[in-house]
Amino acid sequence: PSAVWIGKMLYGIDVRKHGSGNAGATNVFRVLGYKAGIPVLLFDVFKGWLAVQLAIWIPVPGLNPDMLVYVRIGMALAAVLGHVLPVYVGFKGGKGVGTIAGAGIALFPAAILIALAVFVVVLAITHYVSLSSVIAALLFPLVVYFITGVRHPGLIGLSILAAVFIPVTHRKNIRRLLKGEERKISFRPKTTPE
């Protein structure tokens, strides 16, 4: 849980006790600013990517290409679950967007770039990270299937799972958005935690 470790080691702050109380990159941006938020985000993305890549780098004899795809999907799921429910900090982690993006870079690079573009456009217009994440996630399986032409059933299933998983982890944010109570993100440096 990089948000917890970076917050405690470099700032002496447990981000779970500030802002939204979430151990994810968005809350680190909100509480500690971009100097802490960018490394947390990059690490979260990296661990999702690395987990999927390990399945290629560590060869398993007798594994055919189709089976390898399913092993990589399993590694992606393990990384995301480990991020959302980290053993080391009482199973209270982030919402998984960065780690899903990292796994997606390894599995669906073109689709992730399109989803990232959607995320950035929505964020630039609204300044709501949660809304940007949910919209990009909901569009992701459509991008995977219709734009990038992926036809592997496991990968299509994973893209649909991501489109369901991200809104589920953001359900409190969605309720706040509907009530007009969701906080917008600011990328200004922080002098004191919120």
Image: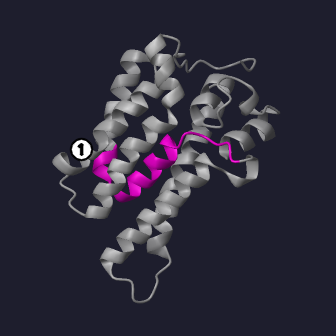
- Picture coordinates of residue 171, whole percent (x, y): 49, 30
Picture quadrant where residue 167 is located: top left
Q: Can residue 59 be found in the magenta stretch?
A: no
Residue 88 vs residue 32, the one in the foreground:
88
Above-or-below relation of 138 to 86: above
Is residue 142 rendered to the left or right of residue 158?
left
x and y percentages locating residue 135 in the rendered image: 35, 31
Q: Amino acid at mark 1?
A: Val
- Quadrant of res 188: top right
- Tell me, what colour scheme is on the image? one colour
Check the image and report above or below for 64 versus 90: below
Q: Is residue 93 magenta?
A: yes
For the C terminus, the image quarter is top right
Residue 66 in view? yes
Q: Secondary structure at mark 1?
A: helix
| Dominant SS in magenta | helix
Left or right: 119, with 100 as reference point = left
Which region is colored magenta?
91-112
Q: Dot 1 corresponds to which residue?
A: 143
Residue drawn at (56%, 47%) of the image = 44
Residue at 66%, 37% (x, y): give it: 23
Question: Residue drawn 43% across and 71% down?
Answer: 71
